Image (cartoon, helix red, strand yellow):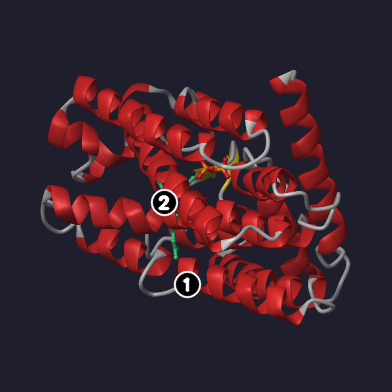
Amino acid sequence: MDFPSELSRQVTRVDRGLDQLLPPAATPPARLHEAMRYSLQAGGKRLRPVLVLATARLFGAKDDAALPAAVAIECLHTYSLIHDDLPCMDNDDLRRGRPTAHRQFDEATALLAGDALLTHAFALLAEGYAAQPALANALTRELADAAGSRRLIGGQMADLLAEKKPSTPAELEFIHLNKTAAMIEAALVLGGLVGGADPAAVAALRQAGRHLGLAFQIIDDVLDATADSATLGKTAGKDATAGKTTFVRLHGLETARRLAREHSDAALAALRGLPGNPAFLLALAESMAGRSR
Ligand code: GRG
């Protein structure tokens, strides 16, 4: 398998799906729909939707069966980035190499574009899987759990509270498991559910997602401390400026890199236990561990 060309093929499928499954930019009110597309089409790495497609395919899903779920998770992820960048949270000017949504439009439009993307994610699941109500229900529950107050939103709340006082290692793990790993875990599980994975395989996907998510976040901390804003497409060095506790701050760069490696090895081990040929998923997990942006 030629990983770079396969990855670029999958990213193109996601980009096409995003274009097809989002309301056209001219839909009234056009300013809102333009803002939704502006943030979505700014060109993120598309890791979560590609994980959905690759996992669904591993379990034998037909081409495009997983596309609504893949687009849904990217909509949800993008809403979380738009809201995270708002002045009331991270107050950031740069995202995906472009001005953040509230800089490009205005704060209210950015807030509403985020709200609309979050809502649209669930509409996509309801509409895309209407012919399979049990699957639609399972996908909705999975995404709602991952995005809800105990996971993504809870992780974000804990992260904001952590700006006020140093976090313990356990608090930091709570933040990362929920703010970051929840969506990566959900991507693998959504793909598995679309492909009809059995409960044991879903549990293995969850395990892989948890470790992959932790590795991803530790690498994010390392990159925040070592890379520049142009490479990252977002403001670098923010954690240090905010005085935030990170893996790098708690453990130092060397140990953070080792922990990232350990989590990504654990993710790879869980993926290797899956049926079929997970070569693309393994290569994708490896590339997430070795990423530079
Ligand atoms: C506002 C509910 C709410 C949640 C915000 C996404 C998020 C939670 C905060 C952004 C800051 C951050 C470091 C989150 C951890 C997850 C993470 C590394 C997100 C960025 O994901 P990438 O690198 O981004 O996959 P692209 O742009 O490539 O999609």
Q: Earlier in the sequence, mark 1 or mark 2?
A: 1
Q: Residue at x 47, y 22 (%)?
A: 290
Seen from the viewer's position, the closer of residues 61 and 169 is 61
Of 149 and 210, nearer the camera is: 210
Task: Give me the residue at 24% from left, 51% from top.
Answer: 173
The label shown at residue 123 is none
Q: What is the number of callouts on the image?
A: 2
Residue 118 x/y as whole percent: 61, 70
Q: Position of residue 125 (x, y in %)?
A: 72, 72
Residue 102: tell me if it is visible.
no
Can residue 6 be seen from the camera position used here? yes
Residue for badge 2: 180
CB under 8 Å between callouts 1 and 2? no
Of residues 259 and 115, which is closer to you in this image?
259
- Please state which of the two labelled residues, at mark 1 or mark 2, is closer to the viewer: 1
Q: For ligand 1, tell me if the residue under mark 1 lies within 8 Å.
A: no
Residue 103, position in %: x, y?
Answer: 56, 53
Q: Is residue 4 above or below residue 160?
A: above
In the rendered image, residue 226, in percent from the top left (x then y), is placed at 34, 22
In-front residue for pair 292/36: 292
Using the image, tell me which numbered label, if any, was put on residue 145: 1
- Quick one: SS at disc 1? helix
Residue at (65% x, 79% y) in the render: 137
Q: Is mark 2 within 8 Å of ligand 1?
A: yes
Q: Residue at x 59, y 63 (%)?
A: 76
Q: Is residue 11 above or below residue 109?
A: above
The kind of residue on which mark 2 rests is Thr
- Mark 2: few, some, or many residues within 10 Å (few <14, many ≥20)? many
User: Which amino acid does the dot numbered 1 rest on?
Assistant: Asp
In this picture, is 146 found above or below 37?
A: below
